[in-house]
Image (cartoon, rainbow, N blue to C red):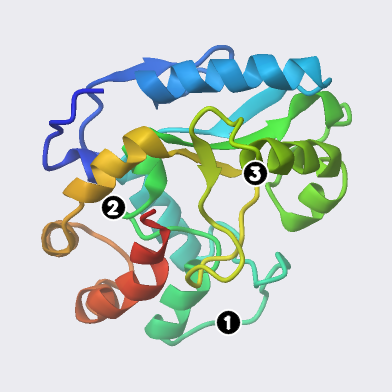
Amino acid sequence: MNEVVSKLAPFGLDEEGLVSLYPEKLLLRKEAFNALEQLRQLARLFGFEIRVESAYRSFDRQISIWNRKAKRELPLLDERGQLITRSIDDPEELVKTILIWSALPGASRHHFGTDIDIVDASSIPEGYEVQLTPEECNGMFKPFHDWLTREIESGNSFGFERVFIPGRGKIQPEPWHLSYLPAARIFQKEFNLQLLKGLYSETDIACKEVLLDQLDDLAKDYIFPYFL
């Protein structure tokens, strides 16, 4: 991969170098795409069919997710993945509640185009809509994740690693989220917190005052622990 990236690329604002996944019709960096194809071939040997639920995500799309969660147009979940039904009126509490399962706009690893959310398509019952929850990982997808854990621990995952694991930062563990670290590290290196603040200043983002005032502290818990 060309190690020179634009200053906007880590924030989901530069789609140069992305290629289309098939059949999901999602976008991914070419190097990550090639590694994914190798992982898919290996998975098939063990009876698993990797399906990508999410790959590259633009800044605007992450803003949309964030704002809709703030407005309760999308569900808010607690640490156990259960729906939160009570009202949350304090902006700071709302920010930290959203962050349980959703990244800060501009700080999502999906902006890099190197990270993916995956499931085993062969395990999904007909008509079932995947939610990407711990219950799924401990249920229908448990054999797949057990296999994936073994491959990662043996160094046979073609550069993909889990980043959201227990004990690392304050984001809930996400076994389904893989990062192609050889390329992701390039975007991590170019990430600039001050530039992100500037983007927030110019963006219609929910809880803007809290984000601008507390971004340095939030980054210590929700961004930088995952820069491996």
Q: Position of residue 35 (x, y in %)?
A: 49, 21
Q: Position of residue 90 (x, y in %)?
A: 43, 87
- Specify whether residue 29 is in view: no
Q: Which residue is at 85% across, 39% downward? A: 143
Q: Secondary structure at mark 2?
A: loop
84 to the left or right of 73: right
Give the amino acid type for the residue marked by disc 2 in the picture.
Gly
How packed mark 1 is, by other alpha carbons closer than 10 Å (few <14, some 14-19, many 20 or more), is few
Q: Earlier in the sequence, mark 1 or mark 2?
A: 1
Q: Which residue is at 11% across, 42% downward? A: 7
Q: Which residue is at 61% across, 30% downward? A: 156
Q: Secondary structure at mark 1?
A: loop
Q: Position of residue 162 (x, y in %)?
A: 56, 48
Look at mark 3 in the image and give the residue it sits on. 153
Look at mark 1 in the image and give the residue it sits on. 87
46 to the left or right of 60: right
Give the position of the N terminus as an image quadrant.
Answer: top left
Compared to residue 149, the image places residue 104 above or below, namely below
Q: Position of residue 174 (x, y in %)?
A: 61, 54
Q: Earlier in the sequence, mark 1 or mark 3?
A: 1
Compared to residue 198, the image places residue 131 above or below, namely above
Residue extending furthest bottom?
Answer: 90
- Specify whether residue 39 is in view: yes
Indicate which label's residue lies in the foreground, 3 or 2. 3
Q: Which residue is at 36% across, 60% downward? A: 104
Compared to residue 64, the image places residue 166 above or below, namely below
Give the amino acid type for the residue marked by disc 3 in the picture.
Glu
Look at mark 2 in the image and give the residue it sits on. 106
62 to the left or right of 43: left
